[in-house]
Structures are given as structure tokens and as C-alpha cells.
């Protein structure tokens, strides 16, 4: 991919010249009723050559915060590049959006289906159309996401840190409250984009099917900072606080089923051994105090009060201890919540041996 926009940009059979603003629609398929399903794509071109940046949301149809972030950027007329091109796709997974679902109707995840196949599953076809029409055009991108059902994420950037200077620069420019190192997953957009020479960072905030106003505002500001970093807009708001940079994270999972009560908030700092919640049986016979096996920041929190064994309860990001990054590691202003439950009669401090995998067998009351 070239860092210089050609005189004519070809997309979906259209030729878009410098200085033009175009809305086109990529036809994906039809519903059983015959209704055409297409993906609206906004293209904003400057007269002066420059990079092409993708802003995309709705890869998972129930993740509405990113959709609303891009909608506001468009509605407020903030996507007027001084150079280069901005391609904005508010919703990639139209099927999921219509059905309040993460996946497409066949149950597959679009973000595990790249680079796709024109004769494959529906998710694979969506991915293939994106790869054919959009990927060859872009140099950089921001992929907007949200936590899953009942699980909320604090505003954060996820990317492959310290392995690519351009990616590090994009993450630093966005300046989210947290920046988390995240490896590349097979079949994901980020992995495929990296193979194509395109740098994409992921912005996460809130939980599915709920608007997170603070996270949306941070997403808008961070996007403008990235565009300013690339010389595509004249100004952008300064970040309100330094970024907390984390190179690893740990999911703390439920060893027992029951009623989960959280004692922490998103963004809060926790120390090793600090109580972060409790799980109790619903009959008043037993309660287990949950203590964090690690020191870090709460970047993800399960709001579901009823949990099963193995359910993810809290996501703890662990700090980068490298001296060169120490100046970026600052605590949040929030004060830890004091533990008020007095009926706990057992403590669970079993450490999660690896991120996203608790390693525990089933345990019963």
C-alpha cells in the first residue's frame, strides 16, 4: 500500500477523485425475504495526497459504542481531511446489528473469518468483500469494539506493542486511559491487516447494547488525535491524563457458581491480596471472599450477578515495569471501594496461571 493517495480512488465500481465526499454501499447478500443487505461506506478525500485511514465499527453487531462514535464524527462533520483519505464504516456486520447479535445468522464471528472466502460461510463472505474492496486502499485503521454481554471494558487501546514503531505511534497518539498489548489472533482483522502491511489498533469501551457516553467522547477525541498525528486534521483535543501502558493481563474467573458481588470499579487499581468481590450461594449458607492474585488495574468487569463456574469476573491489566515506560504509568483518581460485606467465611486467592485461562477444575460448594 502506498502512503500517497492516487488521483483516482476506485471503490465498489466508483471512481472517487481528490476533494470528493461519497457514500457508497457494498452489497453483501439478501435476507430470506429478498431484502438486500448492504454496508454503507463513507469516503472523505482531501485534495492533497496523504495516507488512507479506516474508521470501522460494528464488526460485532451488538457493540453499539463504536457505531455511535463514528456516527457522531460524521454527523458533526469532523472528518474533513487536510490530506489523504478517511474511509468510515459505521457498521460492518449489518446482520448482527439488526438481530442485536455479536455474530452473523450462521453463528460465526466475522472477526475470526478473515481473509474470508467468496464461497464460504456468511461471515467469511463479509470478510472477503471487505478484503477485496477496502483493505487494498488503507494504510492505517481504528477498529472500534465493546465488551460482551454483561461484561464492560474501561476505555482502552489494544494493539501489538513494542513490535512495530508505527503501531506504537498510533496507540500513543490515541492516548486512551489504558493501552494494552494484545497478540494477533488467527482469522482476525488485525492479523490479516498486519500481513497486508496495514496498521490497525482496536479501541474498546463499555458493554454491548449500552451506550457509554464517556467512552464515546474519549473515542472521538482519540480518533482526532490519531488523525492529527498523521497530519490529516489541523487540531485535536489534548488527552486529559497520561496513558497506563500494560504488557499483560489476567482474567480472574469464578471457581464457584452463585451470586457475584463486585467490590471494584472499572479503572480502579488493585493490589495483590485485595478483595475484589465475593461469590455466595443463593440460600445464605456460604460466601467466599475473592482476592486478587495480582497487582494491576481493573480494565474489564462482569456486571452479571449470577455466575457459573469458569465465568470471567474481572480483567486485570498488569503494568509494564520497564523503566523507559515508567513515566507513562500513573494511577487513576478513583479511590478503591471499601469492602463492606461481613459474612464472608472463606477466601479464594487461587491465581489464574495465564491470561484468559483460569486452569482450575470444577469445584462445588
Image (cartoon, rainbow, N blue to C red):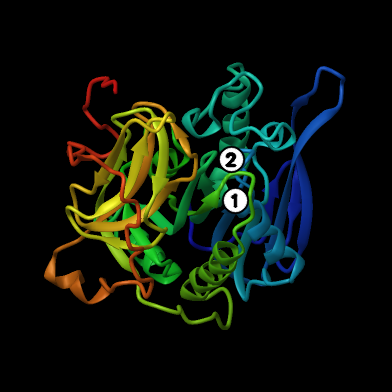
Any part of residue 144 in sight = no
Q: Position of residue 25 (x, y in %)?
A: 77, 43
Do labels 1 and 2 touch, CB within 8 Å?
yes
- The residue identified by callout 1 is 56
Mark number, residue 296: none
Image-based side of 104 in relation to 229, left or right: right
Would you identify the image quadrant in which residue 325 lies? bottom left
Q: Position of residue 179 (x, y in %)?
A: 35, 60
In the image, 309 versus 320, the foreground residue is 309
Image-based side of 248 in relation to 257, left or right: left
* Residue drawn at the location 60% of the way across and 53% of the way down: 66
Determine the secondary structure under disc 1: strand
- The residue identified by callout 2 is 59
In the image, 248 versus 162, the foreground residue is 248
> Label 1 vs label 2: CA separation?
8 Å
Would you identify the image quadrant in which residue 263 lies? bottom left
In the image, 191 versus 177, the foreground residue is 177
* Residue drawn at the location 66% of the way across and 22% of the way down: 105
In the image, 310 versus 239, the foreground residue is 310
Determine the secondary structure under disc 2: loop
Q: Position of residue 159 (x, y in %)?
A: 36, 52
Q: Relative to 13, is 89 above or below?
A: below
Any part of residue 290 in sight = yes
Q: Quadrant of the C terminus?
A: top left
Q: Position of residue 54 (x, y in %)?
A: 57, 55
Number of labelled discs?
2
* Neighbourhood count class around disc 2 (C-alpha, 10 Å): few under 14, some 14–19, many 20 upward: many
Amino acid at each position: 500500500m502506498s502512503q500517497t493517495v492516487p488521483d483516482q480512488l476506485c471503490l465498489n465500481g466508483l471512481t472517487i477523485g481528490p476533494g470528493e465526499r461519497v457514500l457508497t454501499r457494498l452489497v453483501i447478500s439478501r435476507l430470506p425475504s429478498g431484502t438486500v443487505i448492504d454496508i454503507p461506506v463513507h469516503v472523505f478525500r482531501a485534495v492533497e495526497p496523504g495516507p488512507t485511514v479506516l474508521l470501522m465499527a460494528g464488526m460485532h453487531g451488538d457493540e453499539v459504542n463504536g457505531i455511535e462514535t463514528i456516527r457522531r464524527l460524521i454527523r458533526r462533520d469532523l472528518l474533513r481531511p487536510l490530506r489523504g483519505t478517511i474511509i468510515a464504516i459505521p457498521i460492518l456486520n449489518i446482520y448482527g446489528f439488526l438481530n442485536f447479535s455479536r455474530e452473523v445468522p450462521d453463528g460465526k464471528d466475522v472477526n475470526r473469518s478473515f481473509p474470508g472466502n467468496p464461497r464460504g460461510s456468511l461471515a467469511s463472505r463479509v470478510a472477503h468483500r471487505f478484503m477485496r474492496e477496502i483493505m487494498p486502499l488503507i494504510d492505517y485503521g481504528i477498529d472500534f469494539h465493546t465488551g460482551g454481554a454483561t461484561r464492560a471494558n474501561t476505555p482502552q487501546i489494544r494493539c501489538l506493542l513494542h513490535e512495530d514503531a508505527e503501531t506504537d505511534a498510533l496507540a500513543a497518539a490515541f492516548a486512551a486511559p489504558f493501552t494494552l498489548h494484545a497478540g494477533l489472533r488467527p482469522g482476525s482483522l488485525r492479523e490479516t491487516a498486519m500481513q497486508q502491511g496495514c496498521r490497525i489498533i482496536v479501541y474498546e469501551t463499555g458493554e454491548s447494547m449500552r451506550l457509554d457516553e464517556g467512552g464515546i467522547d474519549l473515542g472521538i477525541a482519540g480518533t482526532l488525535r490519531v488523525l492529527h498525528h498523521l497530519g490529516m486534521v489541523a487540531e485535536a483535543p489534548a488527552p486529559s491524563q497520561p496513558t497506563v501502558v500494560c504488557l499483560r493481563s489476567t482474567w480472574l474467573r469464578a471457581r464457584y457458581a452463585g451470586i457475584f458481588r463486585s467490590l471494584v470499579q472499572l479503572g480502579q487499581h488493585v493490589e495483590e491480596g485485595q478483595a475484589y468481590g465475593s461469590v455466595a450461594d443463593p440460600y445464605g449458607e456460604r460466601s467466599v471472599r475473592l482476592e486478587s492474585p495480582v497487582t494491576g488495574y481493573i480494565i474489564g468487569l462482569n456486571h452479571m450477578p449470577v455466575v457459573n463456574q469458569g465465568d470471567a469476573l474481572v480483567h486485570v491489566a498488569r503494568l509494564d515495569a520497564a523503566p523507559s515506560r515508567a513515566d507513562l504509568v500513573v494511577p487513576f483518581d478513583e479511590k478503591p471501594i471499601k469492602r463492606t460485606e461481613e459474612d464472608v467465611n472463606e477466601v479464594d486467592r487461587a491465581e489464574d496461571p495465564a491470561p484468559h485461562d483460569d486452569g482450575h477444575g470444577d469445584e462445588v460448594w
